[in-house]
Image: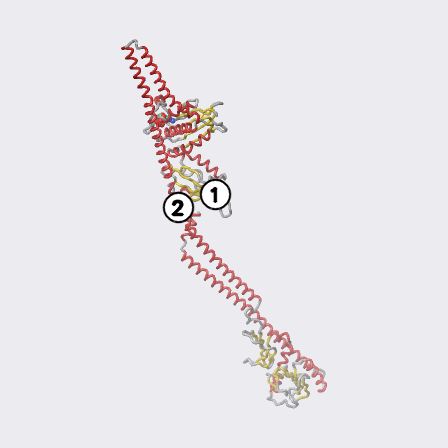
Amino acid sequence: MRAWNIQRLLKVPKVRSAWRRRVLWTSLLLLLLLLLGILVWLAGRYEAGQEQTRIERATSEAVSDIRAAFSRNSRSLLATQYGDPKPELWSLAAYSLLRERREMVRIEWRDSNLKLIAETDSPYRSPVFDPGERPETPNSELAQNCSNARRFSGPSYSSSYYVPLDDGLGIEVMELCLPLVESGRVEGYLVALYALHDVLEEVLGRQVTRHQEVAFTEGDGTRLAVMGTARRASRVFSAQQLVDLPGTTLVLRLDSWRGSPDLFPNLLTALVTALAIALVSILYQLGKDTRRRLKAETDLADALAFRKAMEDSLITGLRARDTQGRITYVNPAFCQMVGFSASELVGQSAKAPYWPPEFADEYKRRQDIRLAGNSPPREGFESVFMHRDGTRFPVLIIEAPLINAQGHQTGWMSACLDIREQKRVEEISRASQERLQATARLTMMGEMASLLSHELNQPLAAIQSYATGSINLLRDEPDARRDVEIAIQRIAQQAERAGKVIKSVHDFVRRRDQAREAVLPQSLIDAVLPLINLQARKLSVQVRLEVAPGLPAVQCDRTMVEQVLLNLARNGMQAMDLPGTRNRVLTLSVHRANDRRIEFSVADQGMGISDDIAAQLFTPFFTTKVEGMGLGLSFCRTVAEQHGDTLVFLPNQPQGTVFSFALPVA
Ligand code: ADP
């Protein structure tokens, strides 16, 4: 799984993916900006809509206020005529009405021919007309308006017109004509003059005019009277509505300058804008983060590629196992070493396919020990693997715990080295060493033999000549007793001398007795084990040790006994080196024979010893091997005998032979 991911990571076409990513990011950014723009625009529009609705509502409210004020004024005007007052009295009533309703600037009472009966001007401003200035002609504005009033039998309003005043200014006014009807006949008229500006100021009041500009306009937009201050703004909300009056129509227009033209018109838009800014900055941060990730990913891919190249170029086999003993990873060198592919090895747990069947149990035990948490030796250990074709080969394994990023152990990583070549070189040097030693021993033996023959030759030759002389004397001169006696004495002397030569050899051998020392059986085994193992691996033999615990030291000639153990072990292993022998186990055991002796035995599972071979087994120079010398066993027996015991051999069960000897307790 992991390996697959790495492969995938390494195979990503970098250029294409970078290009795609850039396009995706750009479209995302554009879409987001578009979305945010639409949102801000919609929020603005919504707000503008709200403002427009508000101003339209305010306009219609203002129109209905104006209508209500006009009809109330009409009723109040009519009320001044109750009880047929005299003109002076009427003037008083009219005057108090003008004081109360500031929008009216003048009230006139006229008869049915429009002749002025009485008039009153507002106390708040100077009279609009000079006395007698108002024409009463039938085609005047007044006459037309009042004829309309008569026709309606109700109030009629004239079109507005401008009246210049004394102070240089002027006002826009509108006339109201109210017919005074009695028993179906028009008896007279009440005429009121409205100042349009005052209508706006008095009827609508400050709350309407504070926030917006209110104006009466003509159809073409010309302002007749304005209230409130116009402000400069890029965008103004306006609403206008007709004030339909009998006789004329006014247009009321409201202009609002509030808010909307600002960048952040209100809370909603400000909120959306703030969110948009936050979103864009998050997007920017995300983009930055992605760039960082991308870089890390590229670095990782590079590092992985580097690691893979390194692993592939290694000649050391690498193998990782998890805490259950399953193989999780092998490098190409390992696969090549054992001849199995990675897919055949990864996931294997119990018995790996490269374990030789004869060692499988031992390896399983070793693996269990490892999984129980015991660390292997730092310098590694030697083992034997089996290639797919069945060839066994020695390997050196160095194991280290696999620790993950959290500091937990997730398994073991092993480096495996094929040490076949190294072993071969070792074996060659060992064999040549052995041959050298054997040659040296032979040379020494030859020298000793020639020395002995030379030493013995003289006394023997002397003995022979004395004996021949004596025989001659006895035959020719029977009386030469004295001479014969001397000759026999000489023979005895020479024999003694030969005996001394023999004894000196014997002494030489005996002198080794002084080389005896107290040695622990285990240390004897430890001394020979490396050499035995060396040969065992070569012959695919498993060496088993059975040393009883707590054994005392033995008194022995250390070098000799070690040589005996080596000889017996080598003979045993060679006896098992036959094609078809599956169980190749050599057992070295040491245990107590009795109070005084410790028994050493070497057991093989070879072909055993037949009776005719057994008969000559200890004969010097007897051998059945091509390169054998036939001296090994006789040497072993001599050494065993020198230590007060003898070398015995018995058949092993189910097959093979057991050689054993005992050494005295020190
Ligand atoms: P070498 O090993 O040089 O032949 P040895 O004296 O050690 O000389 O052995 C003599 C012969 O005894 C061997 O050639 C072999 O035939 C036989 N022999 C020795 N040990 C064993 C054994 N463990 N199993 C079978 N035969 C053996």
Which amino acid type is marked by label 2? Answer: Leu
Q: Judge whether residue 387 can be spotted in this image.
A: no
The residue labelled by disc 2 is 314
How is the structure coloured here? secondary structure
Please determine whether, in this image, residue 70 is positioned above or below residue 600: below
- Please identify the quarter of the rendering in which residue 335 is found: top left
The residue labelled by disc 1 is 401
- Please identify the quarter of the rendering in which residue 223 is found: bottom right
Q: Is mark 1 on a helix, strand or loop?
A: strand
Q: Is residue 90 left or right of residue 230?
A: right
Who is closer to the viewer here, 381 or 518?
A: 518
Who is closer to the viewer here, 172 or 507?
A: 507
Q: What is the distance, in whole Å, between disc 1 and disc 2 at their CAs?
A: 20 Å
Could you tell me which residue is drawn at 61 percent across and 90 percent down?
Answer: 137
Who is closer to the viewer here, 19 or 84?
A: 19
Asked if disc 1 and disc 2 are in contact, CB closer than 8 Å, the reply is no
Q: What element carries label 2?
A: loop
Which amino acid type is marked by label 1? Answer: Pro
Please determine whether, in this image, residue 482 is positioned above or below residue 639: above
